[in-house]
Image: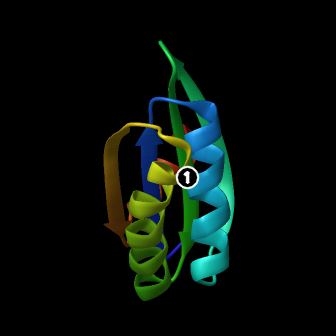
């Protein structure tokens, strides 16, 4: 897993819109969708570092289409191998 990207929103619809845009914007693969509670949803993608950075940048803008609230967005380049167990 060369890189991980995360986008968290306060709406399932906004998270799905962000995920769709992320997958269309760059060569990334969806790893998981985590529903945290209180409407918080995190989408996780992986791919090479440049693709994940481009995808997260696109996902950060896409959530606004549905009126959702962006909570956080992050790219983790070259994550530790133990991180796979958490995801």
Query: Tag 1: Cα neighbours inside 10 Å, few (<14), some, or many (≥20)?
Result: many
Residue 42 at x, y percent in the picture: 51, 39
Residue 85 in sight in this render = no
Name the foreground residue: 61 vs 73.
Answer: 61
Residue 36 in sight in this render = yes
Please state the total of marks drawn on the protein image.
1
Residue lying at 38% horizontally and 72% vertically, measured from the top left: 78
Asked whether, in this view, residue 78 is left or right of residue 47, the answer is left
Residue 83, above or below 50: above
Report the residue marked by disc 1: 44
In the rendered image, the quadrant that contains the C terminus is top right
Residue 34 at x, y percent in the picture: 59, 33
Residue 7 at x, y percent in the picture: 44, 50
Residue lying at 51% horizontally and 19% vertically, measured from the top left: 39
Name the foreground residue: 23 vs 78.
Answer: 23
Residue lying at 58% horizontally and 80% vertically, measured from the top left: 25
Name the foreground residue: 70 vs 37.
Answer: 70
Residue 36 at x, y percent in the picture: 51, 22
Residue 65, above or below 26: above
Asked whether, in this view, residue 71 is left or right of residue 64, the answer is left
For label 1, the SS is strand
Residue 58, quarter of the rendered image: bottom left
Residue 39, above or below 1: above
Residue 19, quarter of the rendered image: bottom right
Name the foreground residue: 64 vs 23.
Answer: 64
């Amino acid at each position: 897993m060369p890189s991980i990207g995360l986008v968290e929103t306060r709406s399932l619809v906004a998270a799905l819109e962000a995920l769709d845009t992320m997958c269309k914007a760059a060569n990334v693969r969806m790893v998981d969708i985590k529903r945290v509670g209180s409407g918080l949803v995190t989408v996780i993608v992986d791919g090479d570092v440049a693709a994940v950075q481009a995808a997260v940048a696109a996902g950060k803008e896409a959530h606004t289409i549905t009126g959702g609230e962006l909570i956080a967005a992050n790219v983790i380049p070259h994550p530790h191998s133990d991180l796979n167990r958490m995801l």
